Image (tube, rainbow, N blue to C red):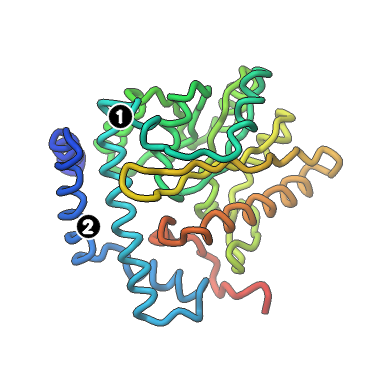
């Protein structure tokens, strides 16, 4: 087991009660804020997306994002031994009828979400609510951490498909069996992916959710969770996107992916401090505002 994995497992062992979780979150938040990992990446992203913000405002938003990520980790580790906590921690839900209807019909869907709110808690909540979730995940480069996350997600009842060569084939098979395949679609795609606007800037964008929808004929359902306070969250399920079977395939994927980007933007702008600003989302050289 790697050093990072040992630290992660040790931290999980400490978080056996709410008061310990609160203490750990405060200590970790202070440490992360002091170290400032990838602060320059987040600052550049914020300059690009919110040019009106002052340096102090950007710093405040970055620090709030650090605290949010620490709490997301603490909550996730607390859930591993008691997954049913997710049902208590989600105190408000809007739009769940969209999910319930597909479950009653025994029809699969593509769930569109991003690294917004506590996405691991969202997955646990969906499983605890009885939805047949299969999450598409990117494994960390640290094999020890990757193995540990696999073990944690298995304890939470979350089935996963790793990103890779056979992703689409496996996902299509699961959807046709009635699964809800979850896709975190807010990170940068490869140079082979679509070049589309996101938050007003062109970037490579994964077209997986649209492609899966078109291949299987199922809808794309946007789902997000926001932290209201520690151990207290709201889930929002928005109206589904219907596959654009009336368009040529490549055009349909582009149109649907641009719609998905707009939905993800809306999710982020509601609570920008709860998004992963530390990711190099805009990797195009000379990226400029598409509105200019």
**Residue 167, image x, y percentages:** 54, 32
Instruction: Residue lying at the far front in this picture: please name it.
Output: 91
Q: Residues within 10 Å of mark 1 (few under 14, many from 20)?
A: some
Quarter of the figure with the C terminus: bottom right
**Residue at horizontal 64 percent and vertical 63 percent from the top:** 197
Q: Quadrant of the N terminus?
A: top left
* Viewer-side residue, 3 vs 268: 268
Rendered residue at 27%/32% (across/down) = 148
Q: Relative to 124, say whether 63 is above or below.
A: below
* Residue drawn where x is 45% and y is 28% of the image: 160
Q: Secondary structure at mark 2?
A: helix
Name the spot of residue 280 as percent of width and height, x first. Answer: 44, 61
Please give the residue where the numbered disc 2 appears in the rendered image.
29
> Up-down: is 151 above or below 25?
above
Horizontal side of 148 relative to 119 (left or right) equals left
Instruction: Please identify the quarter of the rendering in which residue 290 is found.
Output: bottom right
The disc, 1 or 2, on the residue closer to the chain's N-terminal end is: 2
Badge count: 2
**Relative to 249, 40 lies left or right:** left
Q: Which residue is mark 1?
A: 152
Q: CA distance from mark 1 to mark 2?
A: 23 Å
Q: Position of residue 269 (x, y in %)?
A: 53, 61
Where 126 falls versus 18 (above or below)? Answer: above
Judge depth for marks 1 and 2 and give the one in front: 2
* CB contact under 8 Å: marks 1 and 2: no
Seen at 29% across and 49% down, the residue is: 71
Vertical order, 144 against 115 (above or below) = above
Judge the density around disc 2: few (<14), some (14-19), many (≥20) Cα neighbours within 10 Å: many
Please state which of residues 90 and 189 is positioned toward the viewer in this rendering.
90
Camera-side residue: 241 or 141?
A: 241
């Amino acid at each position: 087991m790697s050093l990072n994995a040992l630290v992660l497992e040790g931290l999980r062992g400490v978080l056996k009660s709410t008061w310990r979780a609160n203490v750990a979150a405060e200590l970790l938040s202070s440490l992360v804020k002091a170290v400032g990992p990838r602060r320059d990446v987040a600052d550049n992203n914020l300059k690009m997306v919110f040019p009106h913000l002052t340096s102090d405002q950007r710093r405040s938003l970055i620090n709030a994002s650090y605290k949010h990520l620490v709490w997301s980790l603490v909550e996730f580790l607390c859930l591993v031994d008691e997954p049913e906590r997710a049902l208590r921690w989600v105190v408000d839900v809007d739009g769940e009828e969209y999910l319930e209807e597909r479950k009653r019909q025994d029809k699969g869907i593509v769930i569109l979400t991003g690294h917004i709110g506590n996405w691991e808690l969202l997955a646990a909540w969906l499983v605890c609510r009885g939805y047949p979730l299969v999450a598409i995940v990117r494994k960390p480069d640290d094999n020890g951490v990757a193995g540990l996350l696999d073990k944690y997600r298995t304890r939470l009842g979350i089935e996963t498909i790793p990103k890779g060569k056979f992703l689409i084939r496996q996902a299509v098979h699961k959807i046709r069996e009635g699964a809800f395949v979850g896709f975190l679609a807010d990170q940068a795609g490869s140079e082979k992916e679509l070049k589309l606007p996101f938050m007003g800037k062109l970037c490579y964008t994964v077209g997986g959710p649209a492609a899966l929808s078109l291949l299987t004929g199922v809808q794309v359902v946007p789902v997000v969770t926001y932290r209201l306070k520690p151990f207290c969250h709201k889930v929002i399920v928005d109206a589904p996107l219907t596959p654009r079977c009336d368009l040529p395939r490549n055009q349909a994927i582009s149109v649907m992916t641009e719609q998905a980007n707009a939905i993800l933007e809306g999710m982020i702008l509601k609570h920008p401090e709860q998004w992963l600003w530390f990711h190099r989302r805009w990797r195009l050289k000379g990226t400029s505002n598409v509105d200019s």
